[in-house]
Image: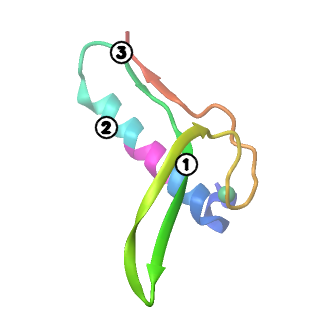
């Protein structure tokens, strides 16, 4: 996938999807596994160069890439069951 090589978020999503597919399909576990990919806003705060921590907002459906804007659509992984 050429696009994933250009955008770091798309590349990360592709890597995680491939890893999860491998783990779920090779796990040979009975029952149904569903993995949903979502997006959230992460806030990192620094004061005078010192990290004050971070917080993550509620998550939302991942309809498009927040970095390059590419439409992503449904990439959920459902296996078994
Ligand atoms: Zn992207």
**Dot 1 alpha-carbon crowd within 10 angstroms: few under 14, some 14 to 19, many 20 or more:** few
Q: Quadrant of the N terminus?
A: bottom right
The residue at 58%/34% (across/down) is: 75
Residue to which mark 1 is pinned: 40
Taken as a whole, is the magenta stretch helix, strand or loop? helix
Q: CA distance from mark 3 to mark 1?
A: 26 Å
CA gap between label 2 and label 1 equals 24 Å
Q: Earlier in the sequence, mark 3 or mark 2?
A: 2
- 15 displayed left or right of 4: left
Q: Quadrant of residue 18?
A: top left
For residue 50, above or below residue 20: below
Residue at image mark 2: 23
Q: Is residue 2 above or below residue 74?
A: below
Circle 2 packing at 10 Å, graded few (<14), some (14-19), many (20+), is few
Residue at 56 percent across and 59 percent down: it is: 11
The residue mark sitting in front, 3 or 1, is: 1
Q: Where 57 sits versus 36, above or below?
A: below
Image x and y of residue 35, in percent: 44, 30
Q: Which residues are magenta?
A: 15-19
Residue highlighted by disc 3: 32
- Disc 3 is placed on an element classified as loop
Depth check: 42 or 6 in front?
42
Residue at 47% across / 43% down in the picture? 17
Q: Nearer the viewer, residue 77 or 69?
A: 69
């Amino acid at each position: 996938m050429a696009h994933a090589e250009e955008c770091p978020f798309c590349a990360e999503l592709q890597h995680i999807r491939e890893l999860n597919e491998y783990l779920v399909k090779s796990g040979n576990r009975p029952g149904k596994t569903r993995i949903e990919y979502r997006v959230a806003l992460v806030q990192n705060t620094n004061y005078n160069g010192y990290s004050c921590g971070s917080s993550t907002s509620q998550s939302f459906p991942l309809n498009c890439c927040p970095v390059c804007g590419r439409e992503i659509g449904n990439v959920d992984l459902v296996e078994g069951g």
